[in-house]
Image (cartoon, grey):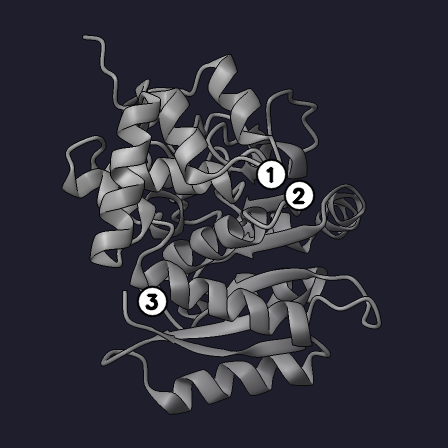
Amino acid sequence: MSTNNPADRAPSEGELALSTSADSSIGDVLRRSKGLTDEQIEQIVLYQRANNLRFGESAVALNFANNDEVLWALSQQFHYPYAIKGERELSEELRAAIDPFGEQSEVFRDLRSQLLTDFFTPDKPKAALAIVSPDSGDGKTFFSANLAVVLSQLGAKTLLVDANLRTPRQHEVFKIRNDVGLSSILMGREESHVIHQISDLPSLFVMPAGTVPPNPLELVQRPAFGLLINDLLNKFDHVVVDTPGATNGSDSRVIAAKCGAALVIGRRNRTKMDGLEKLGMGMARSGIRLAGMVINEH
């Protein structure tokens, strides 16, 4: 069924051309996408001035656009990619992709700013960032996926690697195939299509875990994993790595050591502070650079 709602379809070539213009305003974007006339644009402007509203709010109040269409127009105006509703069935966990101006997305953007200021800096050795936590269910998949999204939304070429070779979930979150992935590479197979570019987020790439192996710890301990991380750091601006919970074995510590850096997360009302501190101190003793600790409410 056809629709005039740009939030429910891919933008046309004309809309894409408009969105790349440095002079495009939200009015220009809505004029093109909604087919608004000069008279309708003038009505919106007059209503905006009379009621001290934003242009988009006025367009919605006058029924010339809906909230989703205004959100889409804003994303085009500021060149801020997000997942267009109806285009791709991404998981609701990807808050930064499907609700880029929501409260949870703002938290991830704030964290991104802190990392770019204190961690991803030119004066420090480049490293992949392993997301680690004491236990399964602490929210590592949710956290690493959304962190990768907000890093990519700045235009930085970002890769998310699912190194949880025990209970991987990133392929479910991003709705991508998982028959080949990290485990395939570590087992010495030359596979194509191991890295997936996320179409709605052009700077974001995901490497799924692949087939769950019987020997996950042995695989990440192989020199091939460290060589792979180094190669990926040369090809991407940022590399974020999802890991298993520390209670599942030594996987996360080994992965973090090969990545060079780790961010420790816990879950509110579940993770004990002594468990977080013990994990962080263990990482530090292994020479792993700590980017910080975060309490996750998801």
- Residue under numbered circle 1: 203
Q: Residue at x 31, y 52 (%)?
A: 54
Q: Residue at x 21, y 30 (%)?
A: 64
Asked if labels 1 and 2 touch by Cβ distance under 8 angstroms, the answer is: yes
Label 2, secondary structure: give it: loop
Asked if labels 3 and 2 touch by Cβ distance under 8 angstroms, the answer is: no
Q: Is residue 250 visible?
A: no
Label 3, secondary structure: give it: loop
- Residue under numbered circle 3: 138
What is the distance, in whole Å, between disc 2 and disc 1 at their CAs?
5 Å
Who is closer to the viewer here, 189 or 91? 91
What is the distance, in whole Å, between disc 1 and disc 3 at their CAs?
27 Å
Type of amino acid at the residue the image marks with label 1: Ser
* Sequence-earlier tag: 1 or 3: 3
Instruction: State which quadrant residue 7 falls in.
Output: top left
What is the distance, in whole Å, between disc 2 and disc 3 at their CAs?
27 Å
